[in-house]
Amino acid sequence: MGVETTDREFVERLERDFPEVEFRWDRPKFSYQMQNGKKVVFLGGPQPNFSLLALHELGHALCGHESYDTHIARLKIESEAWERANTVFLNYQKQAQDNPDLARILPEWDEDFVQEKLDTYREWLHQKSKCKKCGLTMYQTKDGKYHCPRCESFL
Ligand SMILES: [Zn+2]
Ligand SMILES: [Zn+2]
């Protein structure tokens, strides 16, 4: 099964409106990367909310995300990318009111889907940050290491 025609057309629309970002169809998973100074969005395989996921990766590109140091930073950039995606979406929604062609390919914003996506990061962050000895929530330093405020003493 291929990607829906409307999704394909929506991505083509994004390609036209955001020429500074390159969209590539050759990856199994949605992702965003800087490659040789170019912003590249990799589109995943056919799946529900395809266009929203494309918007999300575009959000990373528009926010200029490059890397993250800590898992908390990861969660932060994920929600930033969705916020940016929503800004682009709302702008399209406004334009679509007198543009039936755009209205036809514009996806529906699915906030439950967005929160579900963010929840997987929240859950992951929670798992990663629990101290295995005492169960207390640890904090992560810039070097990526976790520290438990109870089990580790800095005195
Ligand atoms: Zn993301
Ligand atoms: Zn501990």
Image (cartoon, rainbow, N blue to C red):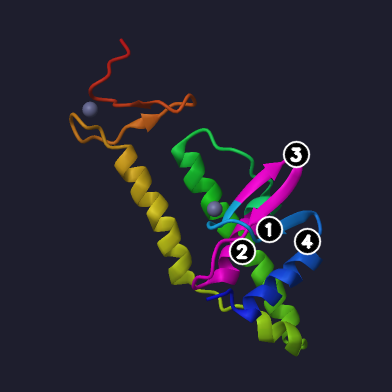
Please identify, in this view, whether the residue under mark 3 or under mark 4 is nearer the observer: 3
* Mark 1, secondary structure of its residue: strand
Mark 2 and mark 4: Cα distance apart in space = 12 Å
Q: Amino acid at mark 1?
A: Arg
* Mark 2, secondary structure of its residue: helix
Residue 114 horizontal/vertical position (percent)? 48, 65
Dot placed on the residue nearer the N-terminal end, 1 or 3: 1
Residue 107 horizontal/vertical position (percent)? 60, 78
Labelled pair 1, 4 in contact (Cβ < 8 Å): no
The residue wearing badge 4 is 18
The residue wearing badge 3 is 36
- For image coordinates 52% across by 54% down, the residue present is 79
For residue 49, side relative to residue 65 (left or right): left
Region of the chain picked out in magenta, as a range: 32-59
Dot placed on the residue nearer the N-terminal end, 1 or 2: 1
The residue wearing badge 1 is 24
Q: Amino acid at mark 3?
A: Asn
Q: Is residue 145 above or below residue 93?
A: above
Taking the magenta stretch, the answer to whether it contains residue 9 is no
Task: Give the quarter of the figure containing the C terminus.
Answer: top left
Q: Is residue 123 above or below residue 73?
A: below
- Tell me the number on the disc at residue 54: 2
- In the image, 97 versus 144, the foreground residue is 144
For residue 66, side relative to residue 111 (left or right): right
